[in-house]
Amino acid sequence: MSQPTIDSRALRDALSSFATGVTIVTTADHSGEPVGMTASSFNSVSMDPPLILWSVTKTALSAPVFHKAQHFSVHVLAANQMALSNRFARSGEDKFNGIDFQLDANGVPQLAGVLTRFDCNTWSVYEGGDHWIIVGEVKNMETQKGEGLVFSGGSYATAASIQPPNPDNPNDDGPIEELLIYNLARAYVQVSRRFHASVEESGLSIPEWRTLASLHGGKSRTVPELVARTFVSPKKMNHLLTQMKQSGWLTVEDRDGAQIVTGSPKGQSQVEHLFELCAQQEAEALGASGKSGQDRLIGLLRQVIENTNE
Ligand SMILES: Cc1cc2nc3c(=O)[nH]c(=O)nc-3n(C[C@H](O)[C@H](O)[C@H](O)COP(=O)(O)O)c2cc1C
């Protein structure tokens, strides 16, 4: 009977469907030099005794050091530490030069700014094919709340938590909750209600704000581009542009038969404070999701806009 063969490339690709966190494991070599490498093979093993494991490829320059080391620390990286992960994934470079760390009593480097650090004594090292499986006993740990860096499908990612349906929530009214269109509409109405009140308080109409915001920074746009960004009909747009031109908020020139609209400094000054206010109100609306949640949401919405652009 012939043995089924597994292609390494295909195996690597299949394994990459299993999303993991990202860690940097550090130790010191025999002369006390700091050593470290990025590893996503970290996992929990036992609660009592408290054991964790990770595996190091035998070809890594630091493999012999980890194989012998009696102490090591595993650092779970935060969502904003992609550059640090890349630095420690480059073989043999002076990875510690210029980064923030301190040595513990065993001379093991402890990196600053990580989500969690596990300080371990080496419990056992097993041979696992072309890797060493290193099991550590956790002797000390430090952890803080925050979003972790994720590695999935060969790329870095951040984890978005899924809100479970809440049976006690009276607004939770069935399958409509699952519809993108419903959630987009509701979020839009709720977020814009407050901001649009601020726009009107500042003396601008919503179409004027949208036009000036689209021309912010002295940008030039064609009339159809403005129509797409302001949701004003082409007929009304011409009327609106005439009025705004009279106010000195923009200029309109004819270029090869197309009308090109450009924002003026006076127009920009009308909306400067509204941009700040908008950012403030958006941050409040996003709550704990913060800047990374905002980037993720905007990225998804841009995809939706692109996929549905006619
Ligand atoms: C996200 C990510 C996860 C990694 N996980 C591991 C791992 O679990 N084990 C491993 O041996 N190498 C892993 N690597 C590769 C090592 O970090 C890389 O081979 C490093 O250059 C080794 O450094 P050294 O040769 O200086 O020891 C990973 C790389 C990345 C980018």
Image (cartoon, rainbow, N blue to C red):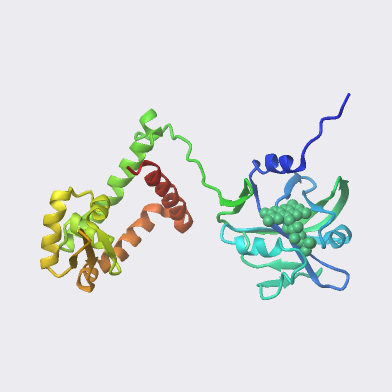
Q: Which percent across, then down, holds residue 281? A: 33, 58
If the picture is divided into quarters, which one holds ligand 1? Answer: bottom right
Q: Quadrant of the N terminus?
A: top right
User: Relative to 179, does residue 251 appear above or below in the rendering?
Assistant: below
Q: Which percent across, then down, holds residue 120? A: 78, 58
User: Relative to 97, does residue 126 appear above or below in the rendering?
Assistant: above
**Quick one: 289 or 64, which is closer to the camera?**
64
Tell me what residue is drawn at x 86 percent, y 61 percent.
70
Q: Quadrant of the C terminus?
A: top left
User: Relative to 197, does residue 7 appear above or below in the rendering?
Assistant: above
Q: Which percent across, then down, holds residue 11? A: 73, 40
Left or right: residue 92 versus residue 193 is: right
Left or right: residue 121 versus residue 295 is: right
Tell me what residue is drawn at x 14 percent, y 55 percent.
238
Residue 174 can be seen in this image: no
Q: Which percent across, then down, holds residue 297? A: 43, 50
**Quick one: 26 or 50, which is closer to the camera?**
26
Tell me what residue is drawn at x 87 percent, y 60 percent.
64
Residue occupying the far top of the picture = 1
Say which quarter of the image contains residue 108: bottom right
Left or right: residue 213 versus residue 85 is: left
Say which quarter of the image contains residue 252: bottom left
Tell me what residue is drawn at x 23 percent, y 66 percent.
262
Residue occupying the far front of the picture = 256
Residue 145 can be seen in this image: yes
Say which quarter of the image contains residue 105: bottom right
Left or right: residue 134 versus residue 278 is: right
**Quick one: 273 or 12, which is closer to the camera?**
12
